[in-house]
Amino acid sequence: MIVSEQRAITALASIVSMRMLGLFMIFPVFALHAQTLPHVTPVLIGLAIGIYGLTQASLQIPFGMLSDRFGRKPIILIGLLIFAFGSVIAASSTSITGIIIGRALQGCGAISSTVLALTADLTREEHRTKAMAFLGVSFGLSFILALVIGPLVYQWIGVSGIFWLTAILAILGVVILQTMVPHPQYFKPSTGSVRLQFKKVLKNSQLLRLDFGILVLHLVLTSLFVVLPLVLVSTEFPIEQHWILYVVVLITSFITMIPFIIIAEKYHYHKQVFVSAIFALICSLVGLNYLHDNFIGIVVMLFLFFTAFNLLESNLPSLISKMVPPESKGTAMGVYSSAQFFGAFLGGVIGGIIHQYYNVETVFAFAATVTIIWFIFALSMKNPRKSTHSRANEQ
């Protein structure tokens, strides 16, 4: 990549990472913190964790379409400001209802699809896959950092402080957007029918397989964190040491997944690596179902889970970019991001309902079942062609 491409991608990755850091820092601590709030149930805990996904899912497609017509940066700016406002609402709340409202407003800053589309606008075609993979890796790193520092920050400033920190990170993202991200030189506003663009994306069966995949991936992730902090505490592993577990598991899993990314890109084994990662995800969830009361078993299964999760999370945007026509990038990324966040919402709500009316084992069994369904769909996926010019015709 040339210097301007490197600078733009680094800036966009920073914006996405800081935003996701704020969203995910409450994951490892909120289920425990919520026990101190009045009138709390497992369903409300799951809703508070996952509600941002519903508003994100509802607005990703409109934001992506608007960015195709009016430009990427204005839409990203609006989204960051809305996200900051929601963080302030959540930080100021002393009830589960207020936190749910704040998390819902956070989700209204639905910029993921627009950031992905802007990344494609600012990179040459031969470097686009690397740029998308870099964003995916940055997302993974921010997720790792969030799980590691979440318990530490919670000990210092509590959940309210985490939300205030999230608002500050959003404002910092605005500064980076305005000072470091250029306007795309060759961006042309879309003049085609919005309905036609949407229909074109929804008719692409290969894109739909990937959209379903990201939905399941985040459904599983969110449902896992409805019960994981409670499971760890039940093994007499204190919350102030949870960050140590996350450091070990997430860093080792991240290092482990890197060779598989290289193999997929270098030897064009995208489908083989992709399907194998889904199978590993299934194995980890089945293992957690049977070993959730054994600390060593939990550690091993979490290592397997996050190795597969990070690999899939970094590969999915790259695969999407190979299959979408240039004039529909914003719309396609909107559908993809909507599926991602709707999965997060479903995982939080369904995980909370299952935990309230059944047990922890059923949450893991549910997550494993939907992942098996994804695995079956992925088996019929086509390996993307090396030439990106053919991606619009992939069906």
Image (cartoon, rainbow, N blue to C red):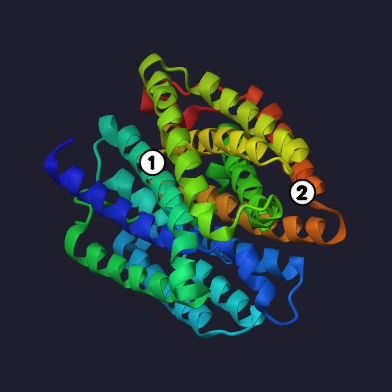
| Residue indicated by mark 1 | 137
- The x, y position of residue 226, in whole percent, is 67, 57
Which residue is drawn at the image coordinates 48% and 49% (left, top)? 244
- The x, y position of residue 196, in whole percent, is 52, 49
Residue 348 higher or lower than 303, as above or below: below
The quadrant the C terminus occupies is top right
Q: Label 1: state its secondary structure.
A: helix
- Name which quarter of the figure residue 264 lies in: top left
Which residue is drawn at the image coordinates 56% and 22% (left, top)? 382
Q: Amino acid at mark 2?
A: Val
Residue 128 higher or lower than 197, as above or below: above
- Which mark, residue 299? none
Q: Residues within 10 Å of mark 1 (few under 14, many from 20)?
A: many
Residue 111 shows up from this direction: no
How far apart are the two marked residues, 2 and 1, measured between alpha carbons? 28 Å
| Residue indicated by mark 2 | 363
